[in-house]
């Protein structure tokens, strides 16, 4: 860790000043299911499958005292799995701020599409492939499914298949984030197909149409001030408030968003972002979003898995808050575990700094007896702002920002090796 104190203004470094967290917050806004896509790395062992699953923390080499990289069991048993099913873009970057905290209690399994943007798997093939993986993984482990946007429709279908074919297969529950089961009633259903038709001589208009879609995703009122405070090295999100986690986010910024490659920057291959071509957007709207929503909605009344929803209250891409209430009625009180509304969050920023997803999981499924490591056993993070205003989830920095050249010392570098050595790992 850098022992030098931060200057009163920007903490400029060799790359581009500040501890990079502000850049992450800004770029996260553009990870829309209609705009961008994280390119999938194809798993050799799953080459014939429509999807594969990876743990971003493992790929990054992330390690922190009391968290991922130092704890693999709870009460003598392996940590439960958290399977994250992303939006139709396949991007794993929308939730990356949550990964270190989730990794204190779960082993992450994040879904990727075989072939990335070139995938032309059907919705049924996605369901079958994902369900097969979860069923296999849950043979000896408990599993929590978290689906975001299109991933929520997919998660409902996967959970229902496991329920019918594998007697729930150790499935702990289902978390639906801004669920795209509302697709037919959404702005995306109108604007998305129009954008996808901008081909041939109309293609020069396609990039401009993406700016229109961006207006449905961005929430500058609640994102710009925290971003500026991070640029000035004044504040930091509470869920990132440790040098280990700041270094993780710095690595994401350098490798995934700025394209840097090298030792310690493997996470960039998993979280990097590419832009949809019109034909990719057209296929996923027609073959995934529309039939996926219809299929998932038809299963709701027979779903027997504890389910909760997390929605941004300024989601303009999908009517997520209204949809959560509809889902609650359709699933019924026996299986419904509540709705978490994230104030000031848009479609792609709901899983950002304004939410502690692990805390909401603890609270939502408390009645189901999910056994997770207690908060006393995990890294102690300071409490952030709990208001509904612009500073929600933020706090004044309690430590100086790291230099970019220190980022890779906190995963596969000297500090990580020393930590693992002291812990006998």
Image (cartoon, rainbow, N blue to C red):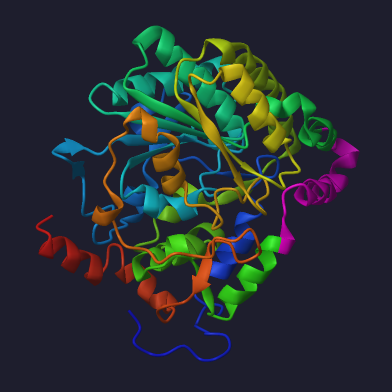
Residue 160 location (% of width, % of height): 48, 15
Magenta stretch holds residue 180: no
- Decide which of 27, 260 is in the foreground and name it: 27
Residue name at image x 52 percent, y 18 percent: 157
Residue 29 relative to residue 155: left or right: right
**Residue 249 appears in which quarter of the rendering?**
bottom left
Q: Residue 292, relative to residue 18: is it above or below?
A: above
Q: Is 75 on the left-hand or right-hand side of 107? A: left
**Residue at the spot x=49%, y=40% of the render?**
40
Which residue is farthest left?
424
Image quarter of the C terminus: bottom left
199 magenta-colored: yes
**Vertical order, 59 against 403 (above or below):** above
Quadrant location of residue 352?
A: bottom right
The answer to whether residue 283 is seen in the rendering is: no
**Is residue 59 visible to us here?**
yes
Q: Residue at x 46, y 67 (%)?
A: 250
Residue 78 pos. (x, y %)? 21, 37
Chief secondary structure of the magenta portion: helix
- In-front residue for pair 109/171: 171
Question: What are the residue bounds of the magenta stretch?
Answer: 197-221
Q: Look at the image and tell me in which quarter the N terminus lies.
A: bottom left
Q: Indicate the position of residue 256 as horizontal and vertical percent values.
A: 51, 57
Residue closest to the eye, 14 or 143: 143
Q: How many marks?
A: 0
């Amino acid at each position: 860790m850098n022992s030098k104190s931060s200057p009163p203004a920007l903490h400029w470094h060799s790359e581009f000043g500040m501890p990079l967290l502000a850049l992450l917050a800004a770029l996260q806004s553009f990870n829309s299911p209609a705009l961008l896509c994280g390119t999938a790395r194809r798993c050799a062992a799953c080459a014939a499958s429509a999807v594969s699953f990876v743990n971003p923390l493992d790929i990054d080499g992330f390690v922190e005292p009391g968290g991922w990289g130092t704890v693999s069991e709870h009460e003598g048993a392996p940590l439960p799995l958290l399977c994250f099913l992303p939006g139709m873009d396949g991007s794993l970057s929308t939730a990356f701020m949550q990964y270190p905290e989730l990794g204190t209690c779960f082993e992450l399994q994040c879904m990727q599409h075989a072939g990335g943007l070139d995938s032309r798997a059907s919705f049924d093939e996605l369901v079958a492939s994902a369900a097969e993986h979860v069923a296999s993984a849950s043979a000896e482990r408990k599993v929590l499914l978290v689906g975001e946007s299109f991933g929520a429709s997919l998660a409902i279908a996967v959970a229902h298949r496991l329920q019918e074919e594998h007697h729930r297969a150790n499935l702990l529950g289902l978390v639906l984030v801004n669920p795209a089961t509302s697709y037919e009633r959404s702005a995306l259903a109108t604007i998305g197909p129009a954008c996808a038709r901008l081909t041939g001589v109309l293609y020069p208009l396609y990039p401009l149409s993406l700016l229109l879609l961006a207006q449905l995703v961005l929430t500058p009122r609640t994102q710009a001030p925290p971003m500026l405070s991070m640029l000035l090295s004044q504040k930091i999100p509470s869920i990132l408030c440790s040098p280990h986690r700041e270094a993780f986010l710095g690595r994401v910024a350098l490798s995934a968003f700025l394209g840097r490659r090298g030792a310690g920057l493997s996470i960039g291959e998993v979280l990097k972002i590419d832009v949809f071509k019109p034909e990719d957007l057209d296929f996923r709207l027609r073959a995934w979003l529309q039939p996926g929503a219809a299929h998932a909605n038809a299963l709701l009344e027979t779903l027997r898995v504890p389910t909760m929803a997390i929605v941004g209250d300024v989601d303009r891409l999908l009517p997520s808050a209204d949809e959560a209430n509809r889902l609650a009625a359709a699933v019924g009180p026996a299986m419904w575990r509540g709705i978490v509304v994230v104030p000031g969050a848009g479609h792609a920023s709901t899983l950002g700094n304004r939410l502690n997803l692990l805390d909401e999981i603890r609270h939502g499924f408390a009645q189901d007896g999910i056994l997770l490591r207690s908060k006393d056993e995990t890294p102690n993070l300071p409490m952030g702002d709990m208001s509904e205003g612009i500073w929600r989830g933020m706090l004044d920095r309690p430590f100086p920002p790291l230099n970019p050249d220190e980022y890779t010392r906190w995963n596969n570098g000297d500090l990580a090796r020393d930590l693992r050595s002291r812990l006998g790992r």
